[in-house]
Amino acid sequence: MLLVDATERKKVQLTARETDLLKYLYRERDRIVRRDVLLSEVWGYNTDAETHTPETHIYRLRQKIEADPDHPAILVTEPSGYRLIV
């Protein structure tokens, strides 16, 4: 469970992989994390893997944690990767 909005006491259920992804991005604290790094560190894939796994998980995570998932303010996409704004 993740508390998304303390004022409204809104909690969301995260999958194990969403939790792993969020924890990894949180540890990086505002740094941009490249897609290949996520594949390696969160999923254990080699960097040559042909998969949309990070994009799919980022999309689903945004649906759960962002006030407006179409205009993310917490989990943002950068030209070279992803960044969690804390």
Image: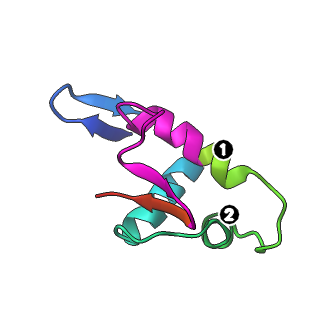
- The relative height of residue 7 versus residue 23 in the rendered view (above or below) is above
Q: Residue at x 39, y 37 (%)?
A: 66
Identity of the residue furthest to the front in this view: 79
Q: Nearer the viewer, residue 26 or 82?
A: 82
The residue tagged 2 is 43
> Is residue 78 inside the magenta stretch?
yes
Q: Residue at x 40, y 33 (%)?
A: 12
Task: State the image quarter where residue 72 is shown.
Answer: top left
Q: Residue at x 76, y 69 (%)?
A: 45
First along the sequence among labels 2 and 1? 2
Q: Is residue 41 left or right of residue 84?
A: right
Mark 1 packing: few (<14 Cα in 10 Å), some, or many (20+)? few
Instruction: Evaluate if marks 2 and 1 touch, with contact meaning CB atoms under 8 Å apart.
Output: no
Residue 11 appears at what percent x and percent y?
A: 33, 32
Q: Is residue 32 left or right of residue 42?
A: left
Q: Nearer the viewer, residue 15 or 52?
A: 52
- The quadrant the C terminus occupies is bottom left
Label 2 SS: helix
The residue tagged 1 is 56
**Residue 14 can be seen, yes or no:** no
Residue 32 appears at what percent x and percent y?
A: 47, 69
Amino acid residing under circle 2:
Trp
Q: Give the magenta-colored segment's residue range.
A: 58-80
> Is residue 17 inside the magenta stretch?
no
Mark 2 packing: few (<14 Cα in 10 Å), some, or many (20+)? some
- The quadrant the N terminus occupies is top left
- The relative height of residue 8 versus residue 2 in the rendered view (above or below) is above
Mark nearer the viewer, 2 or 1: 1
Amino acid residing under circle 1:
Thr
The count of marks equals: 2
